[in-house]
Each structure stands twice: as structure tokens, then as C-alpha cells.
Image: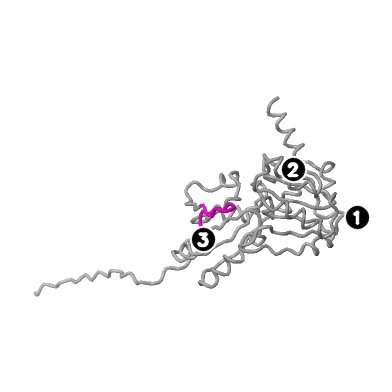
Amino acid sequence: MANKTTEIVTFTSVAVNEPKQSGRVSLVGAGPGDPDLLTVKALRVIQQADVIVYDRLVSKEICQLFPPSTPTVYVGKAKDHHSVPQQDINELLVTKAKQGLNICRLKGGDAFVFGRGGEEMLELRQAGVEVDLVPGITAAAGCTSYAGIPLTHRGLSQGCTFVTAHAEKDLNICWQSLAQLDHTLVFYMGLTKAGMISNGLTQAGLCAHTPVALIENGCCPQQRVICGELHQLEGLVLKQQVKSPALIVVGKVVALAEQLQWFTAMASQQASRLSA
């Protein structure tokens, strides 16, 4: 009887060179500094990201919430010193996403309020990268609230206007329009332009005695609020040695700060309890 031979056939899977699925970028507003002001969604994106790309205005308290195992890339900018040019940041986000990574692009305040989030989103969309936005509390809303300065108040201000005192090339501000609005004016990145802001507004007709406030490190434990009048603005910056990040607030509502301030009083009470 002939021997029967059993043939065993082994199937080996062969990897198919399929294109790797692209990751996504979430443009996340970190708010003005206090980690308790992060939205639930912002915190979830931070915790689930494959990599976090963050700016200078993201506070150290928020950075302490980053998962220790998550790689981070610092791309902070300061006046006259860009650690990473904006175009390089755009390219970094595109490259990382096309490697299949989910990126948390974390910005101080809100990405769409003087945060260049629109520029980054356009670049990502043009490169075919999926991108979404997580809004954050913008500095003007957060810092004035912690300073006890309402942006609007019946009988004092029926509106508010946010202005950047920084531009890529020439700063083109219509001072006449701002002076006639009768709004609360909030200037971002304006410390080095304090004299120009004061002169521009007064020459356009705004009263030189209009209340102003400088809010340094708003919504953070080291917050300082310095109040005065419009004609004193440049002198206050120099005398008090105000440092960035800081906002300049111009308007009648600033006069309410002394009555409505709550953050400084609360911080003082907490410090007293801790030292007792």
C-alpha cells in the first residue's frame, strides 16, 4: 500500500504598502492662564494627544497638566524673538499630522483672537490635514474679569473692542474711529506702544482723563492691576516696570475695578489661611 503524504500549506500574510492614515490637528485655546479656566474639551484633547505643540502664553500651571509620557514641542514667540518662525510651525504641524499623529496645538487665550489660528487652519486645510478648533477664553474676557473690570456696564459702556498693537509690517489703526466708539478698548501686545496709544486716542478726541488699566499676568497668582488715566499710560508702564504678557484697558469701566476686584482679595485670604 502506497504511503500517503500529507502536504501542509502555510499561508504567510504579506504586508501591503497602504498609505498610513493621516492624523489630525486640534487648535486648542488654553485660556488666559488659570488651569481651572480650561474647557473640559480642551483638557481631554491635551490628555489624549500624541504630541503637544504649545506657545509661550500657555502658563506653567497648565503645562503641569501635560501627561508626562506625551512628547511636547515648544514654539513660543516673544517680541523681536521668534524661537520658531510661523511658517516652520505650519510645516511642523503638517508633517506630524501626515505621520499619523494626533496633535494638540495649544495656544494661550483663544486661537482665533490674535492667535494666528486662522492662518494655521488654512495651511492645514490646504495640505489636506484634518483640523478642528477648541475655543478658549480670550485674554480680554478672562483678565478683565479677574481684575474686576466689566467689559460692558449699563450707563458706562455698551460695547467693547479688541485691538492688537502688533503688526507684521505697519500698524494701521484708525484712532478717530476708536475714540468715537465710546466702547471699552482692550489692547493686546501694546506695552511698547503705550505712548502711541495714549497720543493717538487723545489727539482723536478721547478725554486725557479717561481711566486706564494695565493687567499684567492676568488670571495667574502673580497678577498685577495698575490703574491710572490715559495721559499717564506710558509713564505707568515705565514706572511700574510692567512686563509682558499684559493688556491695556481703556474706558470708563476701569473706574469700577476698586469696587469690584475680587481675585486679589481672595488670593490674600488664601495666603493668610496658609500662613496661619
Q: Which residue is mark 1?
A: 155
Q: From this viewpoint, which residue is outermost toward the right?
A: 155
Sequence-wise, which precedes: disc 1 or disc 2?
A: 1
Q: To which quarter of the image does residue 228 belong?
A: top right
Which SS class for mark 1? loop
- Graded by Cα atoms within 10 Å as few (under 14), some (14 to 19) or many (20 or more), the crowding at tag 1 reads few
- Quadrant where the image shows the C terminus: top right
If you read the primary sequence from the N terminus, does the residue marked by circle 1 or circle 3 appear first? 3
State whether residue 268 is above or below residue 40: above
Left or right, residue 90 beside residue 157: left
Using the numbered discs, state the Cα–Cα distance from disc 1 to disc 2 in whole angstroms.
23 Å
Residues 260 and 28: in front is: 260
Residue 86 at x, y percent in the picture: 54, 61
Q: CA distance from mark 1 to mark 3?
A: 45 Å
Which class describes the residues within 10 Å of circle 3: few (<14), some (14-19), or many (20+)?
A: some
What residue is shown with label 3?
89
| Residue at image coords 74%, 55% | 197
Q: 118 or 177: nearer the eye?
A: 177
Q: Residue at x 51, y 53 (%)?
A: 83
Q: Position of residue 58 (x, y in %)?
A: 60, 50
- How many marks are shown on the rendered structure? 3
Cβ atoms at labels 1 and 3 below 8 Å apart: no
